[in-house]
Image (cartoon, rainbow, N blue to C red):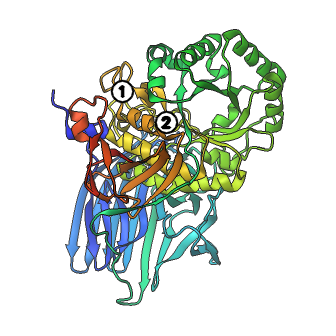
Amino acid sequence: MTVSRAFLLFGTDEKEPEARRIEAGRLSADFVSGNLRTIRFAGKEVLRAISFLVRDRDWGTCEAEIGDLTFEESRAGTVIRYSARFRSPDGALLDCSATIDLKPDRLVFGARFTPDRDFETARAGFAVLHPIVGLAGRPVEVEHGEGRVERSVFPDLIEPWQPFMDIAAITHEVSPGIKAECRFAGDVFEMEDQRNWTDGSYKTYVRPLELPWPYMLKAGETVHQGVTLSILAAEYTVEPEERRQGKIRLSLRRDAGRLPEIGIGLRPDAAAEELDNAGLVKRVGARHLVCHFDPDAGHGLADLRHFRSVADASGCAVTLECFVPCKRPLDAELGEIAQLVRQSGLDLASLAVSPSVDRQSTPPGSVWPECPPLEDIYAAARKAFPGVPLGGGMFSYFTELNRKRVPAAGLSYVTHCTSPIVHAADDTSVMQTFEALRDVTRSVRAIYGAKPYRIGPSTIAMRQNPYGSATKDNPFGKRIAMAARDPRHNALFGAAWTLAYAATVADAEPELLTLSTLTGPFGLIAGAGEPVEAGRTRPLSHVLTWLAQLSDGMRIAVETSAPEGVAGLGAALNGTTTLLLANLTPDLQRVMLPEAGARSLTLLDESWLRDGAEEPKAKAHQSDGLDLPAYAAARIDMQ
């Protein structure tokens, strides 16, 4: 059977919704599935999105069924009208009537919505995204509900709590000579720093988080909300944004520190497949196993013995990622876990602990769950595991670490994970998370200084949902927010994402980076029940092999003239300079290589994957330029 190009790139034949560009004068936007993206004035991004969204009780997205869609285009602008129906998991319906009116200096997006019966939701209404790039740390004016105007700045380091609340309007400078005012109506709006979840935006949303959720929209009651964007600019003051011409340029900074060692996650629910493929860990060159252990999930002696078996086969150091139930005296709980570790014969290189209740997020305004002081948990862990380096942090995401900052003085390292599909799962949003990921690591360093730092396991798919009762099922391999499986992990997209992740966090110099488990939906290799051939290594496994091979070298920082298109990192090792590059787009990217000399090129691209994805081979590359196909990953070795 011939595999489609889409499947090679994304691991799915599902098509992303098509975007339709609407324009009025110098103001433009992309209309996608009832919402607006990439709102620009004279080519400059003003807002990343204006969306009407409905979330279920677990913060999953209720997809809209769009109907009665009409476009009325004239010289004065464009008016779009449509109806949308949202269905909750229990079958309740929310019917919405929406209008978008675009003029040369004004955009109005209004919605009226009514449920057919009581509709349970975590949030229903508008969300407006301001971009990060160009706005972080820059001035902003916030008009509050009572009319007071606050003059402040968009957060530079990531704010754990809402930077602005009770918002009636936000005004910011887009570029010299142009301001944009975004005004809200129909409910109380507030802003959160979405970089906490690696979203590349500040999000202003409806309904304060301090109010109870989920909540009910009452049957038959109609709600009206609206967002108005006004452009305040003198005529002809703004020139179109420069467009990149020709090849992407690279600049290198040598002696930029060290690259992290590579870890691989182990999960008790995949024990049989992991043991069968333990040799792959050694072939990849990973040096650490990050072993997930949760007594509340029934993990015990057999799981620890499994971890030991994989460690013996791979020769890797072992970190036990251990949830502490905190239901009985800490010394008793951790002492019992230590006894099981001794019985298993598992030799721990390090131990990371976190109270079980911290697997769930505690949003602003919510009551924090009962939990012993972290200092007491860490003390009990040291007593139970004397001499074992102890790590702390969150096994979920930076959001939780930012909101509940661990006392790091006695820790050997701090740790957290990320996922790019907490709020949105389209290809563009997932790749835009690297804009925020750099600020995540910068914020960690601002909080914890030079404390050793470990990241992961982090993958596109969510391994747990701190914001609801469970992750979302994804049986048909679609792009779904908060899903435990993501088809792009199987494909070239996943390899490019993995390489770009490593490149983005490199400046923070983490000592350990874990971007995959061994098997299963987060794994190096596909397991039984996966949509690709069981036992086949995924493209990202080769990227991780490259990263592991470079971890002993001196890091070379790679900056590109188009970071939204190509990401890279490098290392100098044994007289060889190696650059790793990833194309973050579905379009061909042309790169100008920075140094002359003999080169070899190893390319993970569509042709390689279609030919069977055998071990990629290096070929001589004489040209100073390099064409990177869609979502390709490349290795360039220069003597």
Mark 2 lies on residue: 548
Residue 537 - label? 1
| Secondary structure state at the residue bearing disc 1 | loop
Q: Is residue 527 above or below residue 500?
A: above
Which amino acid lies under the numbered mark 1 shown in the image of this protein? Thr
Position of residue 137 measured from the top left corner of the image (x, y, whole percent): 59, 70
Across and down, in percent, residue 144 comes to 62, 72
Above-or-below relation of 153 to 504: below
- Helix, strand or loop under label 2: helix
Q: In this view, does 85 lie above or below 205?
A: above
Which residue appears farthest toward the left when viewing the image?
Answer: 1
Looking at the image, do the residues carrying marks 2 and 1 touch, with CB atoms under 8 Å apart? no
Give, as a three-letter code, the residue at label 2: Ala
Residue shown at 35%/83% (left/top)? 239
The residue drawn where x is 77% and y is 22% is 334
- On screen, residue 357 versus residue 172, left or right, reads right
In this rendering, position of residue 227 left or right of residue 84: right
